[in-house]
Structure formats: structure tokens, C-alpha cells
Image (cartoon, helix red, strand yellow):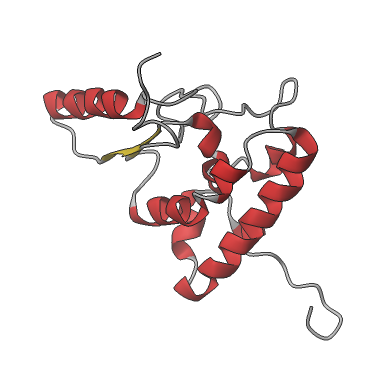
Amino acid sequence: MVSGLIMPRVLDKIDSPVDLKLLPQEVLNQLASEIREELVAIVSAKGGHLASNLGVVELTIALHRVFDSPRDKIVWDVGHQAYTHKLLTGRRHRFASLRQYEGLSGFTSRDESEHDSFGAGHASTSVSAALGMGIARDLSGDDYHVVAVIGDGAITRNGS
């Protein structure tokens, strides 16, 4: 607050990864803090996976600043780690409906957003899905990046 004025949140300026790319580097720490506040407020009220999302805030910001989603494919291994991704890809205004009837999914969903390149649920799918997308890209002669975000517990998955 400056001179009685409420300053707008940086997060409120983000409706797509394009908006994120336009932000100066100096405000990214503030953005990360605001995302964490939003995650704690909504997940505490609606349920969901909190710790795993708090741990990927900076990673998600970096991915969306470096890569060009939805052209570049970001494949989340654990869909319940993609809440920050949802906030940065045009779903912030609906985020309070997370995991509610007819609300946002607790996981990534291709029906929900063009930025969700794969409908992930739980661990151990991102590497094979990203590999398949990369092979399809190469066979079609296209040129974009495919990124697998390997989630909590995916590496230790025992196949059961």
C-alpha cells in the first residue's frame, strides 16, 4: 500500500504466458510470493495438493518464461503439481472452482486448456508421453520443444 492506495498484485496482470514474458525480472520474486498466497488460500479452502505445488512455483514461472506454450508442449508428470501452471495459463479467475463440481480439474486436462498438452493424473507418464510427442513432431517435420516435468515420486515409481 502506498499513500492509502492498494497496489495491484502482479498475479492479477497474468492471463497468459505472454503476459508473464512481459514482466520485468525484478517482479518475479513478488509474483512467486503472490502465487504461493493464492495456492494456500484456495487449496486450504477447496482441498487439493498443497506442498507439491508450493515446490514448483519458480520452476513453473521459469518454464513459461523460456518456452512458448501452447506451441511448446509442457507435459506434467503429476497433474496435481500443475496448479501454478493453471494460474499462469488463463485460469486464475476460475481457480477458486478447483476440484469443485463443474470447476477446474485438480489435474491437467486437454479439454480445459490448450496449454495442457497431456491429461496427466498421477506419476510416471510424462517421459513416455513427451517422447511420443517428440517423435510425432519429428515425423511431421515440425519444430517446437517438448518438456517433461517429472513429478514427485515418478522416479521411484515401482510400477504398481
Residue 142 occupies which quadrant of the picture?
top left
Residue situated in front as seen by the camera: 83 or 14: 83
Q: Residue placed at 78% from the left, 83% from the top? A: 2
- Residue 24: % across, % down: 48, 72
Residue situated in front as seen by the camera: 31 or 158: 158
**Furthest residue toward top:** 160
Q: Residue placed at 62% from the left, 40% from the top? A: 91
Residue situated in front as seen by the camera: 20 or 35: 35
**Furthest residue toward bottom:** 3
Q: Quadrant of the C terminus?
A: top left
In screen coordinates, is 75 left or right of 35?
left
How many numbered marks have been drawn onto this rendered protein structure? 0
Q: Residue placed at 40% from the left, 29% from the top? A: 117
- Residue 100: % across, % down: 74, 25
In screen coordinates, is 129 left or right of 4?
left
- Residue 141: % across, % down: 13, 30
- Residue 88: % across, % down: 54, 48
